[in-house]
Image (cartoon, rainbow, N blue to C red):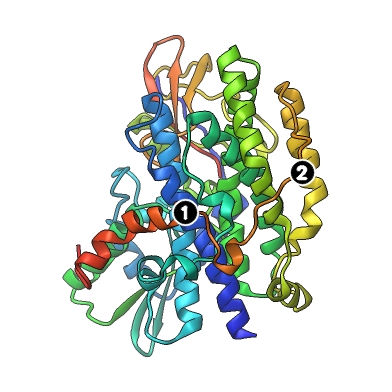
């Protein structure tokens, strides 16, 4: 049984509206094939990293937002975007990193959240709902759906995840941290 | 003013890089695997923060230098980090108590820097504060575990507090450069954070049944480039590859 947590944040709605109003839908669609190197089921759009595509005099300008300050995957993401654009015959482009506004796990798309859960990573709660709460309050196991889980470490294999274990099915799992 | 912002940005980058490097020394040396991962992730947050500050510093300097020049090609006297960041990692209690002191500090400092009139500094701070909240949650919990744990954990934590205390005062000094930047609405008046910092730290130490040191001593000088002998050793190791193979690319 896979438990899904639908969450439509205002921040995601704004991202989606921005994408839908873009004059370059084919480039957005093209870049949907670029995925997070650590969580390959998530596209950069799903993750909330890909946030703007514009055409300027010098060519395309693609704007990405880094997740964590020291995330080593950022360089790979940038190179993967560049490779896809080049393969499609687009020669003139620039990939820009934007720090502000700061990335939030609330930006992850609803599709991305389902993909995370099916992949075995519990999707983050909304940031607002976590204000003042302990990190391990009511996290559902992505394998059996039980909320009888415990945190084993605040940090997992990457900066964006914490380690949990389910007390019912005993499986360890990652929880994508709300930030 | 641009030159002052450059100096200020470099200071903040130095603080982050030096502490990030210290934390990275725990890689494969931490008490257990989860803690190893946690310390390295915190280290990465600081190194990432340093990169953002140095990249901005290089942009302000506009003299062809890159973030790497700031990190790898400056000597001890040119580093302007606060001394508390460069002290050796010590035992695990020492590392975590230092984290507690700096985490409480950054939790007060960064939200104010996020309101800076300088857009880039404000953006870096707004990003970093989210990570620092996580860091503090962890150093707070560890402090409780040390203090309320065994005799040995309590003794080690208390010893760390006593040894670190004199290095905390420097975080709240305001020199002429910072005063100018505060005046200009760009820098943070860290001297105004001291009362709140002390109150929060003493509440946590109280909760952990640890003692706030009564002894008043203070070591200063980091912002002017006067360091403990530890920084030279740290830089020697951190910069050795870059200096041995100039311009080498991965």
Q: In which quarter of the image is the N terminus of chain A?
A: top left
User: Seen in the image, is A154 located left or right of residue B123?
Assistant: left
Residue A68 placement (x, y as % from top left):
46, 52
Q: In which quarter of the image is the C terminus of chain A?
A: top right
User: Is residue B212 visible to the viewer in this orientation of the structure?
Assistant: yes
Counting residues from the start of the chain, the first of labels 2 and 1 encountered is 2
Q: Which is more toward the observer, B106 or B14?
A: B14
Q: Which residue is drawn at 81% across and 40% down?
A: B199
Q: Mark 1 points at which residue?
A: B229
Name the subunit of mark 1: B
Residue A107 placement (x, y as % from top left):
52, 51
Name the subunit of mark 2: B
Q: Name the residue under label 2.
A: B216
A136 shown above or below A83: above
User: Seen in the image, is B98 located left or right of residue B29?
Assistant: right
The picture quadrant where one finds residue A159 is top left
Label ID, residue A20: none
Q: Residues within 10 Å of mark 1 (few under 14, many from 20)?
A: few
The picture quadrant where one finds residue A64 is bottom left
Residue A40 placement (x, y as % from top left):
28, 44
Residue B149 placement (x, y as % from top left):
60, 14
A139 shown above or below B172: above
User: Is residue B46 visible to the viewer in this orientation of the structure?
Assistant: no
Query: How many tags in the picture?
Result: 2
Q: Which is more toward the observer, B168 or A97?
A: B168
Q: How far apart are marks 2 and 1 (CA)?
A: 22 Å
User: Seen in the image, is B104 located left or right of residue A100?
Assistant: right
Q: Residue at x 54, y 29 (%)?
A: B93
B141 shown above or below B153: below
């Amino acid at each position: 049984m896979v438990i899904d947590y639908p969450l439509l944040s205002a921040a995601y709605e704004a991202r989606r509206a921005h994408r839908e109003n873009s004059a370059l839908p084919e480039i957005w669609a093209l870049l949907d094939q670029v995925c997070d190197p650590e969580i390959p089921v998530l596209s950069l759009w799903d993750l909330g990293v890909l946030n703007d595509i514009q055409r300027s005099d010098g060519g395309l300008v693609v704007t990405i937002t880094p997740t964590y300050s020291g995330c080593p995957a950022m360089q790979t993401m940038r190179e993967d975007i560049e490779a896809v654009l080049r393969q499609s015959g687009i020669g003139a482009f620039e990939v820009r990193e934007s720090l502000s506004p700061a990335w939030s796990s609330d930006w992850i798309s609803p599709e991305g959240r389902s993909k995370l859960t099916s992949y075995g990573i519990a999707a983050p709660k909304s940031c607002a709902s976590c204000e003042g709460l302990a990190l391990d309050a009511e996290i559902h196991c992505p394998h059996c759906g039980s909320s009888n889980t415990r945190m084993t470490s605040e940090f997992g294999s990457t900066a964006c995840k914490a380690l949990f274990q389910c007390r019912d099915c005993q499986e360890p799992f990652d929880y994508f941290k709300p930030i | 003013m641009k030159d002052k912002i450059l100096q200020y940005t470099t200071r903040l980058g130095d603080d982050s890089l030096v502490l990030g490097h210290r934390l990275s020394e725990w890689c494969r040396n931490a008490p257990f695997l989860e803690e190893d991962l946690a310390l390295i992730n915190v280290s990465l947050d600081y190194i990432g923060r340093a990169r953002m500050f140095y990249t901005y510093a290089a942009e302000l300097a506009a003299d062809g230098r890159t973030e790497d020049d700031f990190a790898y090609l400056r000597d001890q006297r040119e580093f302007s980090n606060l001394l508390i960041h460069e002290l050796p990692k010590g035992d695990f209690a020492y590392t975590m108590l230092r984290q507690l002191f700096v985490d409480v500090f950054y939790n007060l400092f960064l939200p104010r820097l996020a309101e800076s009139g300088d857009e880039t500094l404000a953006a870096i701070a707004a990003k970093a504060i989210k990570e620092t909240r996580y860091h503090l949650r962890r150093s707070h919990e560890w402090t409780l575990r040390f203090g309320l744990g065994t005799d040995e954990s309590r003794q080690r934590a208390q010893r760390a507090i006593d040894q670190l205390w004199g290095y905390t005062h420097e975080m709240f000094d305001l020199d002429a450069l910072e005063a100018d930047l505060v005046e200009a609405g760009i820098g943070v008046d860290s001297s105004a954070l001291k009362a709140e910092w002390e109150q929060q730290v003493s509440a946590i130490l109280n909760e952990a049944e640890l003692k706030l040191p009564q002894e008043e001593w203070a070591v200063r000088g980091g912002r002017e480039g006067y360091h403990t002998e530890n920084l030279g050793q740290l830089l020697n190791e951190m910069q050795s590859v870059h200096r041995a193979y100039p311009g080498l690319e991965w």
